[in-house]
Image (cartoon, rainbow, N blue to C red):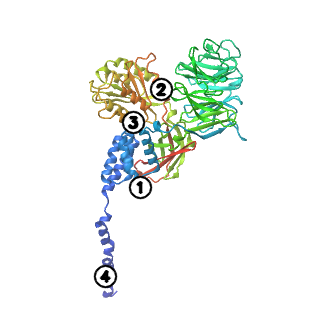
Amino acid sequence: MSRGRYLRCMMLPCLMFLFLTPFLFGQETEQEASPEQKIDMDAVSADEAFMSGVRSYHNGEYASSILSFERSLSFKPDRGITRLWLGNSFYRSGLLASALEQWKTVMDSQAATASLKNLIDSIEYRRALGPALSPESRFVEVDRLEGSADEYTLFLGPTSILPRADGGSYVVSFASNEVVSLSINGMIRTRIRGGLNGLNRPFDALVGPSGRLYISEYQGDRIVSCTPSGTDIHRFGGKGREDGKLLGPQYLAMDREGYLYVSEQGNRRISKFDTDGNFILSFGKRAGDFPGFREPTGICVVDDTLFIADGRRNILYRFDVSGNFLGTCGENLFSEPEGLTLAEDGKLLVADATGLHLFDTEREVSKTLIAAGEGDSFIKGAFDVNGNLMISDFSANAVCRYADFNQLYGSLLVDVERIIENRFPRIVLELSVSRRDGKPVVGLEETNFLVTEGRVEASGMHYLGSVDDLDQAAVAIVAERSDAGRNFSSAFGEAVGSLANGAAGRFEFSFVSAGPLPVREVSSVYGADPLVEALLSGSGEAGRQWQCDSAIRLAASGLTAKNKKRAIIFLAGGPPPASAFDRHELAEVARYLEVNHIGFFCVYPFDGDVPDEYRYLAEKSGGRVIHLFRPEGIASLVDIILQRRDGRYLIEYNSSLDDDFGRKFLPVEVQAYLHGRSGRGESGYFAPLR
């Protein structure tokens, strides 16, 4: 090769290098120097704080989540989604005014959603005493369950409807000789037919204090007692006119002592039995001012007064529980009255030939709730656990459900409270469903829910059940460490020991000493000994200015992440100090408990007036005040706490979203449907970092 050709070959790559250098290196240098291409460190910091806040929120650490979201907003103050979550954290902490302030700011941004608007509307309705100021109730039919059709038979000739605490109901099917147990959606759970002897024209039913079901047999002249599933059957009564015998038994009622009353059409009297079927007494013959029954029908107990309808005399009679005549009421108000059921505030639901009426027993005024149509025969009505009105229509062979029209204005409120993502992509949701007035909607089933991710139906959805049905609770014991509280340490220790033993491993306990500086002394135990030891020898310092509000909040903070029923049992030695709610207002503490479904149960050592603060917390949270020295002790709190219902549900599903190794916010929505009403709740989470 010639020297010139060699030089030309060597120069060509050099020239190409010089020509391409600006494109290979110069361009990149310019991009690095360009302000538009710089990493937004404020955005990175805001994202990290937001992620931390969401994780804290779902762990029930609301104070930490507030700090994280506020830090995120310090870097990016215009992010609507961060303000939304900050409002959520304020809400969970009981700081309602602060929550509304953040949410209303969000309403003016693109982060606003229909579910947020529904939440704000519902809260403001409750704050403004909406239920008290609403127009008078007007009921409209929302569901009608036909007893039979061409392809099926649910029941025939329903004489009584008995709503259950789980949202379902018992329908007494007179013509098909059975009691049908239905779910909230009208699906058959059990058919109770009375075993080998069967039921002979069952007429009415009620549930006793032990959970047993009592059924009157109109043609069999007996009372049947059985378990809710129809087993362990016991009968008493039998045809006859003598004491303890029955003739045409129809309606049933039970007083607060557990005694059973039955109206007998054939004997024209009321007979009283204990729950084992032992005869106590009967009454109904003419005596003094009482003219005697012509046709006793419906019967209901209000406190210690029996109200008994007479279908021939079109009047209600009043008796005490010993059968002594007290007087009459409701004259000229009813036409052939039948079933009586207790409603709110001591009022009675009265079914008669013209419809279903709400009767005020004190003022003796009646209001028609549902007018009977042509061909209707209303036998009995009752409010179910969700506030709907249910009526058994014998002639139409149907059970009808009515809702207050005022409550139909707003959708169901669905609140996704916690998301458990530690088994991602398997996700567990803890959510609650409530009505516009804040009362929980209980008894929902898998068919009532739909889970979506970014509006796309999620796969593998599985209904884990309702927290209401769990036989487990997380309970925080709070002991007042004042000088007065110390005086009752021994009695409190005995009471707590009996309570823990009665719980038999069903309660997960924690213990907080409410001294000048509240201390959580026990975090998670199931037995009595650690609690009693902490109570009797706790480290909490005694003093007059013990912290009531901070102690309650400290105890509650240990319960918010528990997928169980939640309660605080407050051991009070006397009235709280004047500074009891200086750090946190009483209403704020009450909201904190209410929003997080924590019942407040105060154990108080004195008869007479209980401090208003304790009564208020118990009332707002669905708890109770109990006397320390009651003869039966406080072990009954076990059943009371386990019977509380707050409308919480657990649902799991498989996420199909790309989590970007745990750094991407993943949305989730839940829709709930019930009897023509619906609601949507929206939330989100971060998968575990990988």
Whether residue 232 is visible, yes or no, is: no
Rendered position, 100 above or below 554:
below
Pair 4/1: label in front: 1
Point out the tag, 2 or 3, that comes first from the N-terminus.
3
Which element carries disc 2, helix, strand or loop? helix
Point out the tag, 3 or 1, that comes first from the N-terminus.
1
Q: Are dots 2 and 3 in contact, CB under 8 Å?
A: no
Q: CA distance from mark 4 to mark 3?
A: 82 Å
Quadrant in the picture for residue 267: top right
* Residue picked out by circle 1: 110
Which element carries disc 4, helix, strand or loop? helix
* Residue picked out by circle 3: 591
Q: Is residue 558 left or right of residue 467?
A: left
Between 688 and 592, the residue placed more toward the observer is 592
Quadrant in the picture for residue 296: top right
Whether residue 362 is visible, yes or no, is: yes
Image mark for residue 74: none
Residue 282: give x, y in percent of width and height.
62, 14
* Residue picked out by circle 2: 640
Q: Amino acid at mark 4?
A: Met
Q: Amino acid at mark 2?
A: Ile
Between 92 and 56, the residue placed more toward the observer is 92
Point out the tag, 2 or 1, that comes first from the N-terminus.
1
Residue 82: give x, y in percent of width and height.
37, 50
